Image (spheres, grey):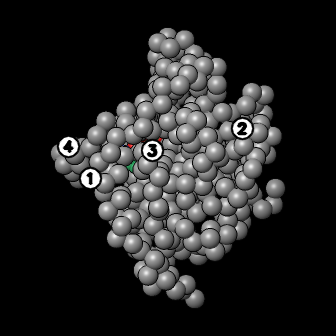
Amino acid sequence: MRKKSKFSKYFKEYKWSNIFAMIRNGRSDPMICSDDFAGRLVVITGATSGIGYHTARKYASHGANLLCINRNPEKSEALRHEIENEFGVICDYRIADLSLLKDIFRVSKELTGLTTPIDVLIHNAGIYLTKRALTPDGLEKVLVVHYLSSFIMNYILKEKLKSQKRARIIMVGSEAHRFAAWGLRPDDLNWEKRRYTGLKSYGSAKTAQLLSMIVFNEYFKNTGVTINTMHPGAVKTETGQENGPVYKWYKRNFLDKTLKSPEISAEALYYLGVSKEVESVSGKFFSLTTEEEPAPPALDRDAAYELWVVTLKLTGLDNR
Ligand SMILES: NC(=O)c1ccc[n+]([C@@H]2O[C@H](COP(=O)([O-])OP(=O)(O)OC[C@H]3O[C@@H](n4cnc5c(N)ncnc54)[C@H](OP(=O)(O)O)[C@@H]3O)[C@@H](O)[C@H]2O)c1
C-alpha cells in the first residue's frame, strides 16, 4: 500500500522566517578561522574537484595532513603531488567509488584501522543527476553517494571516533534538502513508485543525511565527537558533469554565471572543523557558518528513527 505523504503534517510547521533567513544567510560571508591545524588528520571524500579540492588545500595550508577518499587515481595522484609540494604536509588517498557498497565498506574498514586519530571527517563527495540511475547494487545512485556512503562510514567509524574522545564530522549538505518538502519516503528510497526528478532525489538524499544526523548526534552525546551538516553556498564547481548536453549547456551559460567561488565553502568547512567557537556544537545545520533551522521533514525524529532501521536493513549493517 502506498504510504501517505506527510506533507499536511509538515505544512503547519513551515515558517516564513526560516525562508527569509535562508535567503539572508545565502548572501553572507563565512566566518574565518585562522588557527593552526598542524599535524592533525583530516579525512575528506571527493577532494579531486570543486569544494573538496579547495577544502583540502585550505586545511593543508594550515598544516593538516590529509587522507582523501577519491574515485579517480590520476586526479588523486595529481592532488597529492600538488599539495605535498606546495604545503609540505602528507596528502595520502584511498581509491573508492562511493556509489558502490563494497567500496564504501572497504574504505570504512580501512579507516577504522588507522592508528592515528581522525580529527575531522568531511563527507563531501556528491553528484547531481537529472535522470534516475541505478548502481550495480540496484540502488538509486544519488542516494548512495550522498546518503548511504556517509551513513555507512559514520556507522562503521563510530566506535573509533568515540574512543578518540575528540573528532568533528561535517557532512556537506544543501539548502536543496528543502526540495523534499513532502518528506522522505523510506518505503521508496529507490524511486520506484514515484516520478524521479533531479531536484527531488537530491533533496531527499540531503534530507536523509540530515535525519541520520539526529540519531548519530544522540549516539555521540558527551563523547567529544560532534556531527554537523552545512550548506556550502551556491558555488561554481564541476557538479552535474554526468548529465546530458542540455543540462551542461544550461549550467555553463546560466547557472555558473550566478555562482560564487568554492573558496567560501572551504573557509566555512575550515571554520566548522577547527574553530573553538563551534567545538561543542553538534547536531546543527549551517549555511556556511551561520546556524540555520532545516526544513520540517529534516527535523522529524520519528522519521529519523524509521529511516535508521530501514538503512541498516538496506545496507546489511543490521547483520554485522
Ligand atoms: N556546488 C554547489 O553550489 C553546492 C551546493 C550545495 C551543496 N553542494 C554539495 O557539495 C558537495 C561537493 O560538490 P561540488 O559542487 O564540489 O561538485 P564537484 O566539483 O562535482 O565535486 C564532487 C566531488 O565528489 C567526487 N565524487 C563524485 N561521485 C563520486 C563517487 N561515486 N565516488 C567517489 N567520489 C565521487 C568527485 O570526483 P571526480 O573528481 O572524480 O568527479 C569530486 O571530487 C556535494 O555533496 C554537493 O551536493 C554543492
Residue that appears at 40% across and 57% down = 175
Q: Tag 4's secondary structure? A: helix
Q: CA distance from mark 3 to mark 4?
A: 24 Å
Residue placed under numbered mark 4 in the picture: 257
> Which mark is drawn over residue 193?
none
Q: Residues within 10 Å of mark 1 (few under 14, many from 20)?
A: some
Of labels 3 and 1, earlier in sequence is: 1
Q: CA distance from mark 2 to mark 3?
A: 20 Å
Residue placed under numbered mark 3 in the picture: 289
Coordinates of residue 249 in the picture (x, y in percent) = 21, 47
Ligand 1 is in which quadrant of the figure? top left
Quarter in which the C terminus is drawn: bottom right
Q: Judge whether 278 appears above or below 191 on screen.
A: above
Which of the two discs, 4 and 2, sits closer to the camera?
2
Q: Tag 2's secondary structure? A: loop
Residue placed under numbered mark 2 in the picture: 166
Coordinates of residue 187 in the picture (x, y in percent) = 59, 76
Residue situated in front as seen by the camera: 254 or 34: 34
Quarter in which the N terminus is drawn: bottom right
Residue situated in front as seen by the camera: 69 or 305: 305
Of labels 4 and 2, earlier in sequence is: 2
Coordinates of residue 112 in the picture (x, y in percent) = 76, 38
Q: Is residue 16 visible?
A: yes
Residue that appears at 47% across and 12% down = 86
Q: Residues within 10 Å of mark 2 (few under 14, many from 20)?
A: some
Q: Amino acid at mark 3?
A: Thr
Of labels 3 and 4, earlier in sequence is: 4
Q: Residues within 10 Å of mark 4 (few under 14, many from 20)?
A: few
Q: Quadrant of residue 11?
A: bottom left
Residue placed under numbered mark 1 in the picture: 247
